Structures are given as structure tokens and as C-alpha cells.
Amino acid sequence: MAEPGEAVSYEELQLAARNHGLPLEAMAYDLTPTGLHYLLTHYDIPVLDAAAWRLRVGGLVEHPLEISLDELRSMPRRTVTVTFECAGNGRASSEPRAQSQPWLVEAVGTAAWTGVPLTRLLERAGVQQGAVDVVFTGADHGVERGVEQDYQRALDVGAASAEDVVVAYEMNGAALPPQHGFPARLVVPGWYGMAQVKWLTGIAVIAERFDGFQHHAYRLRGDADEAGEALTRIEPRALLVPPGFPDFYSRTRVLRPGPVEVQGRAWSGWAPVTGVALSVDGGTTWAETSLDEGPADSPHAWRRWRARWDPSPGEYVLCARAHDASGRSQPVEASWNRGGFANNSSQRVRVVCLPG
Amino acid sequence: MAEPGEAVSYEELQLAARNHGLPLEAMAYDLTPTGLHYLLTHYDIPVLDAAAWRLRVGGLVEHPLEISLDELRSMPRRTVTVTFECAGNGRASSEPRAQSQPWLVEAVGTAAWTGVPLTRLLERAGVQQGAVDVVFTGADHGVERGVEQDYQRALDVGAASAEDVVVAYEMNGAALPPQHGFPARLVVPGWYGMAQVKWLTGIAVIAERFDGFQHHAYRLRGDADEAGEALTRIEPRALLVPPGFPDFYSRTRVLRPGPVEVQGRAWSGWAPVTGVALSVDGGTTWAETSLDEGPADSPHAWRRWRARWDPSPGEYVLCARAHDASGRSQPVEASWNRGGFANNSSQRVRVVCLPG
């Protein structure tokens, strides 16, 4: 943890220079163009040879599998359009701040992922009685808090059996780029990014709850000693496409008087977004915006929202808040936790309207 | 300017979250995969309609042109393989530090750019007597130090007439991604990134030296009042692919005893790189490495270098330095300037070799 008010460290800056967020103006695109989607890599981006790569499905199964990329591509395919968000999005604004990747609000992106439903692979392998969790192993290898590891996460057998969980080999109609998990990765719609195991090499069915490092790391805790609560699905969030044009250094937005359409995107991993409210006075007053339809059959893709605004010269702070069909509502100020996770406090966009 | 020792500001962090460097392990690829190439955007990434886009060539010419993307694509094409680097690369390590995009060492990338040689366009327009500079205007619009502007840079007529200066519409064989200048951009091999005008909309021949904002901004100055020296070509630099695997937070590299190949890339905008020296003891002793050929006919693409290293357990600091055919040699510690530009101080990579 940083001390209260402590500066961004050299280590946090190193992470910020490697990883990157979505430039918010790119929310104009329904599907985020390659290279603009947020990216968080725990270790290094592995350089993998597609011809040599195999996906091993084993553990508590009748028929262990070893599948080549060509074989994976020959199986029945499904495309899911999904908004991903890093569980650490908003971390840099939590106070005090966990020292890790210092996201502000931009760790998000939406893509169409094509691959084989995981449940088809598990059916083919034949999951045995007594199965509890399914463990996914990536080729990315590193050390974290002294623990050397391949990146690993698990889903319980129920979550792993959802029809929309996919072992994906295409992103937006092209082979996965190296940084998004080439040649194949897991896609778990609605869940935060830590579940979306990239560079997938192994799937193992086990008879107990998985107890790996990343399951301890990604928990909501008030105190280091607490067991805490596992992070799973994405909390609702709305973001604005910042209107007007920017000042280079401050990123303050500049525009001139007259009607503009303010727009943005909103998503939730729990249930479809049902509304977005906009404030142009820093959160004092709010008005509902109009919400476009999301893509058909993709409840886990962001939806566009729009509102008309007719500013006079002056200074404004724009904020947006989403709510969803599960009854969850995005707070103006999210509650604090030690890891800086799931901080969906409302974005604040400073806008200066110049004289006409 | 930051005060000596002053922390990274919120504004610098906002820039670091938007822009991004090359994850150094991606120097494994001769051509940087889309999305891993460094990216610095002064304002917003414009969303442009290729059908409506036109490139206007005007000013001191016989036949002003207005060229569509289809027309540009029908002209004789040329591909140049070029390493780009941001003039601000290394800025975050200069002391005291200019407050701007806080690059460490990773603002680099290499791509094959395909387009029309600029000189063909200028010939078609017919440059008139008295031409001095050629001004390039991008569609990216913003404010910088109070000056509202479209991004603009110029080359003198001599530099603009070099055969390898290209108006590019493809990157690595595909249409330009939005963030790299779609539908067309300027590519000036050997020059720092500020010259590589993206989202190109206008080319104007003028009879005097161009005096735009960005020509004042990108200068080497010791003092704010100095005229300073214009930044043009890239100073030599070598970078290591960090060996072994990383610790997530510190990015310290970890490996085990035994021979490894240490490799990296080196480039210079002034002349071909002629050698790279490696130190494994923090710069006390140096040894020349072996240098691969660069791509044929691409003197401005990085070259791979390699060295064998057989570490015993312990801690090491690895550094590399490039020198080029112009006689320029990368310093261990570059001299300071106010903008934090062209800081090609040698990279320092901390490596821990564990017991076997």
C-alpha cells in the first residue's frame, strides 16, 4: 500500500508504460480496434509457436485431450461480444492506493471473441463424478510476492459449464494478437479480466476448490489479514466519451457554446444495463440519458448512451452513473478496499466552454 | 518542469494510461505487432471516414491536388521498414523532469509502412520556385499551452524530397489502425516521432520557414528562454529484451544459472548501427555483441544484437550501448535538456540469478 498521499512510484510508472487503457474517445467504436483495447499483462507476453502449441485437458476426466490449434479451429465455433474490464480499474483514485498497475478509469474494451465453447471441450473429455473446479493455466510465467508461477485461475464446474464461456482463437474476426493470448485464451463473459486467462495451455478438472495465488490476490479486503470476498463479475459502470477537444497536458476538455450530443458506454457483468444518468454539475443534479440497444444476444457487451447538452460559456464537471437489471447502481463514491479493486466511482470530466 | 524529486503528477499518469510503450519482450518480433508499437497521441485519436477523407496538396504549387484514398492507393507504392521512437523517450528519468508523457525507455516500435513517396505527390502538384518548407497538417485538434491547433509539422524542401519519405496508408500490410493515422500519415525514416504526422489532411508548400507551435515545442533547450536546437533525427540507442522472467511489481528479472542468449535491438536515425556493447556489471566493463543484418534496403529499421551470458547466482545490472556509422555513440548518461528529449542514457536492467 502507498502511504496516504504518497506519490506514484517508479514501479507503478513502469507498469503504466507497459500496460495501457482504452483512449476514451475510442468508445466511439462498438468493437474496440486492435491496439486500443485495454491490456494488463502480469508477466511477459509469451512468444508462442502456433504449430507447436497444444491445449491439454486433463485431471478428473475420462479422456484426457491434447488439442492442436487446427483441431480447435475445426470444432463448432461460437462468437461472443464481450466488454472486458480490469478488476483494478479505478485503483489509482482509491485513497490510500494499492501499489500495482495505476489505472484511472480506462481499463476497458469490447471485442467479438470467436472460439469453441468450453463446455464442448469438457463434454469431449468427459468430466468425472466429484469434479469441483476447472483450473486454467496460461503460458505466462513470473514471480509475484515471492511466488513463482504460471498464471492460473479456476471456475467452479457450474460457471465453467455456461454456454457462453469460450476458448477463443479470434478477436474481431482475426487471429488473436500476441498480447491478447495468441493462440488461444479463455473468455468468461461478465467477469473481470483476471478470469480471462490468456495463452491458455492447460485445463484441469479437480476434486477440490482451487487455492492458487491469483485467487488470494483478487479479493475484496479491508485488511491484509481478512479472508475477504472473491472478485467475480463486473460492477456497473458508465463512462463518457469526453466531449470537445483536449488540452494536451491536463486533458481538460474544451468546446464552444451550442448543442452537443454527449455520449458514452455503460456495462455491467451482473445484468443488462437499464439506465445511465448524467450530471453536468459535478454530481449535484442528474438526468436520465437515452440508451441504445446492445448487440443482439450479447448481454455482456457495453451499450451506448446519449444525451443532448447545450452549454453556455463556463466550467463544468460531467459525471455519469449506470444501473442494471439486477438492481445494482453505480455509486458516486465507491467503498474502499485494500487492493483498489472494483472501484466504480463515477468518472469526473472537466469541461471548459469558451465564449462563442 | 517538476521540482527536483517531485512525484509523478495526476496529469502525467493520465497520459501514461492513454499512451503506451512497447513491452520490451516484443522486441522479439522484427515487425512490432499491431497494438504493441509505442503510441503517443497529442490530442484525441480522430474517427475519420475513409470515403469522405481527402488529402489536399496546395500552397506554392502549379496544380493543387485533392486526392481520395482510392486515388492514393492507385499511385505507385513503396514500402519502408522503419523504427520510430518518441523524442520524449527517456523523459521520466531525466532529473529534473519535464512534466509531459513520462516515458522510461519503451517509446519505440518498428513497422513496414506502405504508401506513396511524398516526392511523387509533390512532382504531380508541381512545386514552384521559391519553395522553402512543406507543411503537414493532421486532423488531430487540441490545445497546448493555450494554443488551439491542428497538429502541424514541416520539413524543408530538401528533406521532403528524400525518396524514402512516404504518405503511408498501410502498416505491416494492413490498413492503418485508427491510432496510427488512418487513413493516411506521413513517414519520415530516421526522424523522431513528432515528424511522423498522423491523420494527414493537408500538405502545403510555403515560401518561408514554418514557425508552428510544434517546431517551438520540440527543441533541445537548457533554459526556457533559449532558441534551442530543433530535434530531427533519432540518436542511437540499444535496448535489451529483459532476460528470464519478471517479478510482477518491480519488473526485476529472474533466471537460473546456465548459459543464456541475451539479445535486443539497436537503431539510430543518423546512420546504420555498427555495434552494440553489453555490460553485465552496471557499466563497469563492456563487451561487443554480435549484430544481425537489418532488413535489406532499410537503414532505418532496428538491428538485432546477441551475446552469450553464463551467469552464476547473484545480482546483476545489464546495460547496452549502441554506436553508429556516423560516429555517434550512445552515452551511459545523456546530457540534460529542459524538455527531456532524446534522453538515450543506457537502459539498466536488474537481474537476479537464483541458485540452480
Image: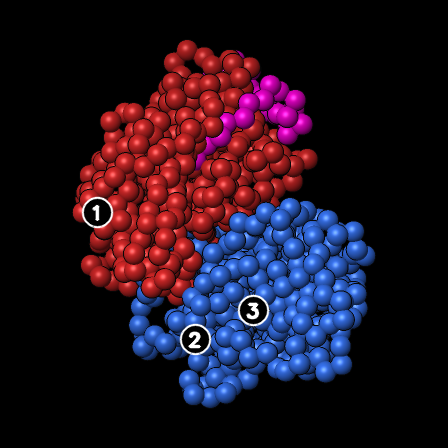
Chain colours: A blue, B red
Q: Secondary structure at mark 3?
A: strand
Q: Residue at x 46, y 22 (%)?
A: B297
Q: Which residue is mark 3?
A: A152
Amino acid type assigned to the residue bearing label 1 in the image:
Gly
Residue furthest to the bottom: A226
Q: Nearer the viewer, residue A70 or A344?
A: A70
Kindly identify which chain the residue marked by label 1 belongs to: B
Amino acid type assigned to the residue bearing label 2 in the image:
Ser
Q: Are marks 2 and 1 in contact (CB under 8 Å)?
A: no
Neighbor class of circle 2 (other Cα within 10 Å; few <14, some 14-19, many 20+) is: many
Q: Which label belongs to residue B283?
A: 1
Residue B61 is one of the magenta-drawn residues: yes
Residue B290 is one of the magenta-drawn residues: no
Kindly identify which chain the residue marked by label 3 belongs to: A
Q: Secondary structure at mark 2?
A: loop
Residue B158 locus on image (x, y percent) = 38, 18
Q: Residue at x 37, y 49 (%)?
A: B259
Q: CA distance from mark 2 to mark 1?
A: 40 Å
Amino acid type assigned to the residue bearing label 3 in the image:
Gln
Q: Is residue B152 visible?
A: no
Q: Quadrant of residue B233?
A: top left
Residue B260 locus on image (x, y percent) = 38, 48
Q: Which residue is mark 2?
A: A94
Neighbor class of circle 3 (other Cα within 10 Å; few <14, some 14-19, many 20+) is: many
Magenta part of the chain: B59-83
Kindly identify which chain the residue marked by label 2 belongs to: A
Q: Is residue A310 left or right of residue A93?
A: right
Q: Mark 2 or mark 3, which is nearer the start of the sequence?
A: 2
Q: Residue at x 41, y 32 (%)?
A: B292
